[in-house]
Amino acid sequence: MMLGNWSVRIGGAALLLMALVSMAAPWLGTVDPSLFDAASRDLRPGESGEILTLEGETLKHTFRMGSDSFGRDIYSRVLYGTRVSLAVGVGAAALALAFGIVLGLCAGYLRWLDGPLMRVMDGLMAIPAILLAIALVALWRAGIGTVVAAIAITEIPRVTRLVRALVLSIREEPYVEAAVSLGTPTAKIMFGHILPNCIAPLLVQGTYIVAFAILVEAILSFLGVGLPPDIPTWGNIMAEGRVQFVAYPHNVFFPGIFLAVTVLAVNMLGDGLRDTLDPKMAKRV
Amino acid sequence: MLRLTPGDPAAILAGDAASSEQIAAIRASLGLDRSLPVQFAIWLGNLLQGELGQSYFYKMQVTTLIGQRIEPTLALATLTILIAVVVSIPLGVIAAWRFGGWFDRALMGFSVIGFSVPVFVLAYILIWIVSLKLGWFPVQGYRRIADGFFPFLHHLILPAITLSVIYIALIARVTRASVLEALGEDYIRTARAKGLPEMRVLVRHALANAAVPIATVIGIGIAILIGGVVVTESVYAIPGLGRLTVDAVLARDFPTVQGVILFFSFVYVFVNLLIDLSYVFLDPRIRY
């Protein structure tokens, strides 16, 4: 059913390709992304040069996407950067969904929790997402874990609201009433009866969070407040390349293209999933 | 909250050569030697008096600092919203009018792409084409409006176009959806039946009835806009509040970070309040 949708097919295929590329990065003609060679600085895409390995040997290497001002291979950095971006995207989405589901179920089903919990969420949502992520990353030592957590925290209120809204309508269904009358434990009703009926919209929302998280990670790294510069990410590569953008635009464009294509693929996947899983919604937007 | 960060602002201010006594002295003068709850209480007390505290780095009141940096940001945001509204609403209406046609499909395709291309990638593509290849606009920088309106606009228009793309995508989508819904109503058929020109049907009948969701999404979009301002100002070297935020985070200038984020959040909530109030004019059935 889902595979019949062209959006899902194209988005899913592109994303799968990205995932494969990130996993197969060591075998795709890359070198260690942290290697640099002063003799190979600022090469244009496709030029050949030399690169110094950690063992002190000099390798002949073709810089498919050129090199940066340290003489590092942009192609290797971009490919390895795919790993970081996908990991951050999926990690942040999983974390936001996990917390959002629990909090949303509690707010929607346990009425006494609803008021206080949702006011906290409203408070968090009043801070524009990217600013909140910047503030949170500044708060902790920058690393993959903290970036993932910071992005997840900005998304938790939205997931919570979605789950709460779904729970409020599902809890009125006859099968929930039946379960209550049979004396089913509250936790089992929440996670066993209500949660499975929220899966489809959550899947769609989760996809959008992946796209958003990849974007925010790149923005944070680009601004210099995200992952430390020794981890190659698309945002870091662009941040380092922007200084000499006028002379060597490839340092900015190649990671930018990868970033845009990945986010586009995830968004298309999300749109397609929404169309197939939720036809009512599809007609409206 | 930000004070739990590992970086020590006193150490950054003192520089590399400072002795530990000098750092301690700076820390005491900033009030950083007191406990966190005490620091927070002082900050909250000052806030109630309209004070956001003293910036560690810029050595001035955060309120003054925000006042100095607000002009570029305000100008950029206003121009962006202006461009976005003027472009996106007609696009959305036409797409809804020709629902399913090539224009509609093209606009929906554009809107998915508009959501996906990060604002700084777009910024560099535009700088590359429009500034470097065509030479129409300056690459970076900002001119105050006091230095003349034309240079001001000339420097601002490219950042505003960059920033407006995602906003256009968002508003056009919602405009199309809500106009489409309105076009299915009976009063549209009636309006057409009595021979009104199509233009009048679309604007006075369909668009007017679709105004509330469009206003709502413009308000929600302010959050995206604020995030975009931070990035755009950084790319185009505009000395506004967005740049200030990033610089302050990097310098561990906590009062400034807190102040700017509080200010942005206040603007976001306030604009949305204004939009809520505007529903009364957009839809006379709504009363408060």
Image: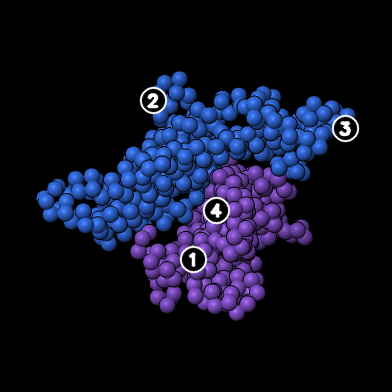
Chain colours: A purple, B blue
Location of mark 1 (residue):
A169
SS assignment at label 3: helix
Residue B253's spot in the image, x, y percent? Answer: 69, 34
Badge 4 vs badge 3, beta-carbon distance below 8 Å: no
Q: Residue at x 60, y 70 (%)?
A: A190
Residue A215 shows which numbered tag?
Answer: 4
Q: Which mark's residue is nearer the viewer, 2 or 1? A: 1
Q: Chain of mark 3?
A: B
Q: Residue at x 31, y 42 (%)?
A: B284
Q: CA distance from mark 3 to mark 2?
A: 52 Å
Location of mark 3 (residue):
B20
SS assignment at label 4: helix
Q: Dot 2 surroundings within 10 Å: few (below 14), some, or many (20 or more)?
A: few
Q: Chain of mark 4?
A: A
Question: Is A267 situated above or below A141?
Answer: below
The answer to which of marks 4 and 1 sits earlier in the sequence is: 1
Q: CA distance from mark 4 to mark 1?
A: 33 Å
Question: Could one spot residue B124 in this view of the protein?
Answer: no
- The amino acid type found where label 1 is placed reads Ser
Q: Dot 4 surroundings within 10 Å: few (below 14), some, or many (20 or more)?
A: many
> For residue B108, what is the image quadrant?
bottom left
Q: Dot 1 surroundings within 10 Å: few (below 14), some, or many (20 or more)?
A: few
Query: Is disc 4 in the same subunit as disc 3?
Result: no
Residue farthest along the left direction in this orientation: B195
- The amino acid type found where label 2 is placed reads Phe
Question: Could one spot residue B282 in this view of the protein?
Answer: yes
Location of mark 2 (residue):
B150
Query: Is disc 4 in the same subunit as disc 1?
Result: yes
Q: CA distance from mark 4 to mark 2?
A: 34 Å
